[in-house]
Amino acid sequence: MRFLACLLAAPLAFGLLATPASAQQPLRTAVDGTFAPHAFPKLDGGVQGFNVDLFTEVARRLGRPITIDSASFSGLVPALNAGRYDFLAAPVTVTAERAENLLFTEGYLYTAFQFGIRKGTTPITSLEELRGKVIAVNKGSAYDAWAQANAAKYGFTAQTFESQPDAVQAVLAGRAYATLGGNTVIRYAATRTPNFVPDFVIKETRAHWGAPFRRDNAELRNAVENVLECMKKDGSLAALSEKWFGVKPGPDDAENTVFPGYGVPGLAGYDATPHEPRCS
């Protein structure tokens, strides 16, 4: 009996010894908890949204628990660099400047500037058609900055509002012809507002939304990217996107595109080493 007990205990002991210590530790991450539909409060506490679902699933496939804090976006990167977080689950636009200081996964979504209009309004097919119209934007946003910089060029008037929902309401009430915002936010608003529809996308503003890591953490960046690529291949990332944004991603959208190497091609931190996703 004593020999049998030792024999039965041996695999368990071996399993504990063979499990990397890091796999026992929760992945620490954070989101901007006011950025619906990516992350926003639940009625019973905590946060919900596309990015919460996405990285909860990434952690599950890595065999790691995860803790997701809700914090102001402006403090997320400093907290990451200070070691408080292992990576950021918040959507972060991959720019050349950011890529000089952080490691990014490949894009799991494309972000782009998109207009939303009232249902039944003549769709926008070019920026030249904005002449003489009023465009509603969220005050202080990147979309506000674009509108202020381009109002004279395209002959429209920019009206600022305290929030994106206020800008949408201006369109529905007829006070503005269209609102300009991020493509995912515009699409999400359309799923919640029957008379509001997504419209023209400014294609030259398209960029990757990736997960940032510290530059000394390529191993974890690559492991997370591997899971993202597997989710692209099995369709689960596209399904999450359709669930939260109300639009089925096209075959060329980031949700369905496995990019070569690790990171965003053409930017600092990109590792061009060929690899095939290792999916279980």
Image (tube, helix red, strand yellow):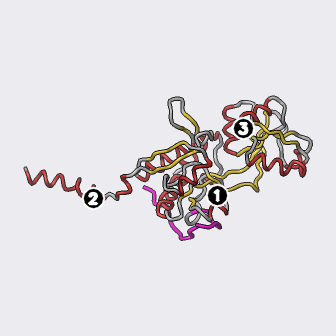
* Residue at image coords 55%, 64%: 262
* Residue at image coords 15%, 55%: 7
Residue found at the far bottom of this picture? 273
* Magenta span dominant secondary structure: loop
Spatial distance from mark 2 to mark 1, Cα to Cα?
39 Å
The quadrant in which residue 133 appears is top right
**Mark closest to the chain's N terminus, 1 or 3:** 1
Q: Quadrant of the C terminus?
A: bottom left
Residue 164's label in the rendered image is: 3
Spatial distance from mark 1 to mark 3, Cα to Cα?
22 Å
* Residue at image coords 57%, 40%: 49
Position of residue 89 in the picture relative to residue 137 (left or right): left
Position of residue 115 in the picture relative to residue 31 (left or right): right
Residue range highlighted in magenta: 263-280
Residue 17's label in the rendered image is: 2
Position of residue 77 in the picture relative to residue 128 (left or right): left
On the image, the x and y values in percent for residue 82 come to 51, 56
